[in-house]
Image (tube, rainbow, N blue to C red):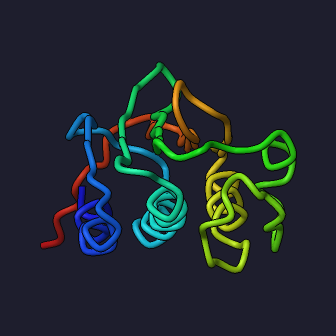
């Protein structure tokens, strides 16, 4: 929620709105800075290529939280589906509106795989769809009190 809220000014400037459907109490194996950076990268990409909407949703399976960021832009070309996670790759004419360096999805992928998760790119019913799969914490964190 915090990262999406951070993106509101960028979205508002482009007349892009956000929807968020994420369970509030989910514990994953990730550090806050890393997950924030990965989400920022994916959201920046989605906002840059959306026509009017970026939708953030999550599902939980027995081992992973699956965070999906979808936009209503033109979607990924066939070539982009192969190379979008490669560092410095920017050859996608279908999503040429962005002005980035071609690092965002590569960074998000490296962070997700570093936690034992994954990042996948695809197209939804309308526009692009990026999924971050992050392992769930096996046990809830516990508090250690010091005397």
Closest to the observer, 66 or 130: 130
**Residue at (47, 38) in percent of width and height:** 68
**Residue at (81, 74) in percent of width and height:** 88
Q: Is residue 66 above or below residue 142?
A: above
Query: Percent position (x, y) of residue 103?
Result: 70, 73
Q: Is residue 134 above or below residue 87?
A: above
**Residue at (46, 42) in percent of width and height:** 72
Left or right of residue 125, residue 114 in this image: right
Query: Percent position (x, y) of residue 39?
Result: 46, 60
**Residue at (22, 39) in percent of width and height:** 25
Query: Percent position (x, y) of residue 33?
Result: 44, 73
Q: Quadrant of the C terminus?
A: bottom left
Left or right of residue 37, residue 105 in this image: right
**Count of numbered labels shown in the rendering:** 0
Residue 36 sits in which quadrant?
bottom left
Q: What is the residue that sits farthest to the top in this orientation?
A: 62
Q: Is residue 42 above or below residue 82?
A: below
Q: Quadrant of the N terminus?
A: bottom left
Residue 23 sits in which quadrant?
top left
Q: Is residue 110 above or below residue 121?
A: below
Query: Percent position (x, y) of residue 55?
Result: 36, 41
Q: What is the residue that sits farthest to the left in this orientation?
A: 147
Closest to the observer, 145 or 33: 33
């Amino acid at each position: 929620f915090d990262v999406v809220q951070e993106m509101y000014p960028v979205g508002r400037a482009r007349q892009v709105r956000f929807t968020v459907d994420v369970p509030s109490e989910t514990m994953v194996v990730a550090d806050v800075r890393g997950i924030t950076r990965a989400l920022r990268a994916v959201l920046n990409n989605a906002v840059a290529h959306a026509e009017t909407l970026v939708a953030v949703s999550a599902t939980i399976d027995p081992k992973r939280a699956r965070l999906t960021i979808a936009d209503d832009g033109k979607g990924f070309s066939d070539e982009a589906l192969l190379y979008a996670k490669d560092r410095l790759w920017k050859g996608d004419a279908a999503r040429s509106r962005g002005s980035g360096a071609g690092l965002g999805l590569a960074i998000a992928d490296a962070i997700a795989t570093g936690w034992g998760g994954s990042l996948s790119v695809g197209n939804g019913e309308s526009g692009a769809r990026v999924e971050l799969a992050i392992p769930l914490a096996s046990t809830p964190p516990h508090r250690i009190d010091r005397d």
